[in-house]
Image: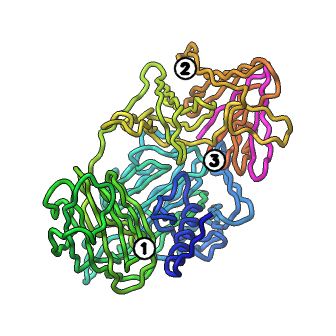
């Protein structure tokens, strides 16, 4: 074992990085932190401000329809149904004819990045009004085919009573795609909003703009400009202003919110000045930053923009040392992102912040540091062995979203790959590929697309359903673009990742944990095609044969699974697992508020608790058909 003593300054920075990493990991899902230099790990971004939902102190409301709850559920077969349990963590609107007010945040915002989850009961309606004036519509739009500016995720229309009937509503923007889940499930919105800007005399010089709206992982709006407030917003003072509270509509129907996070943004907080450079020409091959003290400087100079392509005198074997001054306007934590082709290092006040050394393509690494207000010295070391050059430094800081501080990207930033799409027409399509499952790239995956528009990805190695989706089938761009390095199949639409449940396992006792891998006697035997040209997956044990198949349900809005076993008793199949599995009515279970499961076969599942986890388990018996459908 090696022990080491860090200097106080670096020890503080190490602790800061660990705290930020822990906070970041607790606030995000399905993603991994980026490695920083040597021992430290940096978050991928600065953490959001979390709005505490322990009480209503963070809000202003004029009626009693808003309350804090511990758990909220809704029976999606009943209109406007909502049930709340005591506790904390959820903001619920239980509206009635007598109590139906909007609610306002106590903080005001200009530019903002908002991340929030919401639950919409069947037939309900609400909206999030940025600056109390610009609405992102919330509605039960599950299954809607022809989207309008009235549907969930839309930017609601503006309104002019002076116009003729049929044209009073204008400048509404429907979402690009319908990413809505079934009512009663938790859904996710991530929104970047730019407030209108005004000159010194108060004249508007820039319109409000929704920079990005991502709904359940699908980008539905990008750079949509608003000439003024949308309908239904702030009526007491509809004039556009620089900052104002968020408003959530509470007079149109029940709705619930959780995981309320935001970042407020303002003006640039860092600038660079007094940049000098030393230019070196070094022998090749070179695979790491050289010892600059042993090299002769070929050229020195000053520059306003760090452009290694422009400053280099030849293509191969070049290196630079850049020195300059950072002017810090606002004290706080700053996350730097240094990207280069090939290697680079960033120093601030002589401390190594980012080590991106080595021979590699244009890659980035991150580093976190606390900077006091005033002036700081920075240094960037850089080298390039051959071919493409590139060096760019970005940062994120207090009230400052990620932006480029110095350098130029070697590739067009607006380049968009031409999508290569696959859709089944008359019969199912099957594609073998890699698939992203959380932070892991799965290699033994088959994705099956059905002409009815219900699709899934399946792990052939262990018989686990990985993800399901509806609409367009497969985007195979990453399998064919350039060299097809990633080999990833990506769903065209919003997809639902389900918890991994291998095909089957033996449970000697009621408390035995469900296996994470197939036992030694269970072997995946591939698949056969049924009469509908759909795959039936086969798993062979020493004394049992299991067949597993999937297809659209009868109504085309979900996926049905059928499992059949011949041979030995004692095998079980876990259909779902989560922190909370609940029966919402006689037919449906809800799994962590993510999706519904409906039992269809003669076999009856049971719910058991293993530690903090609940599991929905089916016994596999030869004369009982296990069949259920997933709805989302």
Residue at the (35%, 77%) spot, across then down? 269
Q: Residue 79 carries which label?
A: 3
Question: Tag 2 or tag 3, which sits nearer the N-term?
Answer: 3
Main SS category, magenta section: strand
Q: How far from the left and from the top, in percent, is residue 250?
A: 56, 63
Give the spatial CA distance, label 3 vs label 2: 36 Å
Q: Residues within 10 Å of mark 1 (few under 14, many from 20)?
A: many
Q: Residues within 10 Å of mark 2 (few under 14, many from 20)?
A: many
Q: Name the residue under label 1.
A: 334
Q: How many marks are shown on the rendered structure?
A: 3
Classify residue 524 by image quadrant: top right
Q: Residue 543 carries which label?
A: none
Magenta span:
605-632
432 drawn magenta: no
Q: How far from the left and from the top, in percent, is residue 615?
A: 74, 43
Front-lying residue, 537 or 237: 537
In the rendered view of the protein, which quadrant contains the N terminus? bottom right
Rendered position, 408 above or below 325: above
Going by the picture, which residue comes out furthest to the front?
294
Q: Which colour scheme is used?
A: rainbow
Classify residue 413 by image quadrant: bottom left
Question: Tag 2 or tag 1, which sits nearer the N-term?
Answer: 1
Give the spatial CA distance, label 1 vs label 2: 53 Å
Q: Name the residue under label 2.
A: 534
- Residue 406 placement, left or right of 373: left
Front-lying residue, 479 or 192: 479
Task: Inspect this view and state whether residue 456 appears.
Answer: no
Give the spatial CA distance, label 1 vs label 3: 48 Å
Front-lying residue, 76 or 354: 354
- Secondary structure of the residue carrying tag 3 is loop
């Amino acid at each position: 074992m090696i022990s080491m003593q860090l200097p106080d300054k670096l020890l503080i920075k190490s602790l800061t990085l660990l705290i930020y990493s822990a906070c970041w990991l607790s606030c995000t899902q399905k993603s991994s932190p980026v490695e920083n230099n040597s021992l430290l790990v940096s978050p991928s971004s600065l953490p959001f401000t979390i709005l505490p939902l322990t009480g209503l102190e963070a809000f202003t409301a004029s009626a009693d329809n808003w309350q804090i709850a511990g758990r909220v559920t809704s029976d999606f077969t009943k209109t406007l149904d909502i049930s709340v349990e005591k506790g904390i963590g959820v903001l619920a609107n239980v509206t009635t004819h007598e109590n139906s007010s909007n609610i306002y945040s106590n903080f005001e915002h200009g530019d903002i990045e908002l991340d929030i989850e919401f639950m919409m009961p069947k037939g309900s309606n609400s909206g999030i009004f940025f600056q109390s004036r610009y609405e992102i519509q919330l509605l039960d739009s599950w299954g809607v085919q022809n989207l309008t500016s009235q549907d969930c995720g839309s930017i609601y229309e503006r309104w002019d009573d002076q116009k003729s009937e049929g044209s009073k509503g204008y400048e509404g923007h429907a979402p690009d795609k319908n990413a809505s889940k079934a009512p009663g499930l938790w859904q996710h919105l991530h929104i970047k909003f730019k407030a209108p800007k005004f000159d010194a005399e108060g004249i508007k010089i820039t319109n409000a703009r929704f920079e990005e709206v991502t709904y359940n992982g699908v980008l539905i709006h990008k750079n949509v400009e608003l000439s003024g407030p949308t309908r239904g917003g702030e009526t007491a003072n509809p004039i556009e202003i620089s900052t104002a509270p968020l408003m959530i509509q509470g007079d149109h129907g029940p709705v619930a919110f959780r995981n309320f996070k935001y970042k407020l943004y303002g003006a640039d907080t860092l600038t660079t000045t007094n940049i000098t450079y030393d230019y070196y020409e070094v022998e090749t091959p070179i695979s790491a930053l050289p010892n600059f003290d042993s090299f002769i400087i070929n050229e020195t100079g000053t520059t306003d923009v760090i452009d290694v392509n422009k400053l280099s005198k030849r293509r191969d074997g070049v290196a630079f040392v850049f020195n300059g001054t950072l002017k810090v306007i606002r004290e706080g934590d700053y996350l730097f992102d240094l990207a280069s082709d090939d290697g680079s290092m960033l120093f601030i006040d002589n401390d190594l912040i980012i080590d991106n050394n080595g021979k590699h393509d244009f890659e980035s690494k991150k580093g976190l540091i606390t900077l006091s207000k005033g002036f700081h010295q920075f240094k960037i070391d850089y080298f390039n062995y051959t071919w493409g050059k590139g060096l760019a430094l970005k940062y994120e800081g207090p009230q400052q979203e990620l932006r480029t501080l110095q350098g130029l990207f070697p590739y067009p930033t607006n380049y968009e790959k031409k999508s290569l799409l696959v859709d089944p027409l008359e019969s199912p399509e099957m594609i073998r590929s890699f698939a992203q499952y959380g932070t892991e790239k799965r290699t033994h995956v088959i994705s099956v697309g059905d002409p009815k528009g219900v699709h899934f990805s399946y792990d052939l190695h262990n018989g686990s359903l990985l993800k399901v989706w509806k609409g367009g089938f497969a985007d195979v761009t990453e399998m064919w673009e350039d060299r097809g390095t990633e080999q990833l199949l990506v769903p065209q639409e919003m997809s639902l990742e389900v918890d991994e449940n291998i095909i089957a396992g033996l449970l000697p006792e009621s408390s035995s944990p469900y296996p994470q891998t197939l036992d030694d006697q269970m072997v995946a035997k591939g698949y056969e095609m049924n009469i509908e040209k759909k795959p039936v997956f086969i798993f062979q044990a020493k004394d049992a044969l299991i067949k597993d198949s999937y297809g659209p349900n009868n109504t085309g809005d979900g996926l049905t699974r059928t499992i059949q076993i011949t041979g030995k008793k004692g095998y079980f199949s876990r259909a779902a697992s989560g922190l909370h599995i609940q029966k919402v009515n006689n037919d449906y279970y809800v799994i962590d508020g993510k999706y519904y499961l409906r039992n269809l076969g003669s076999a009856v599942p049971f719910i058991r608790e293993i530690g903090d986890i609940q599991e929905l388990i089916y016994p596999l018996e030869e004369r009982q058909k296990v069949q259920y459908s997933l709805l989302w």
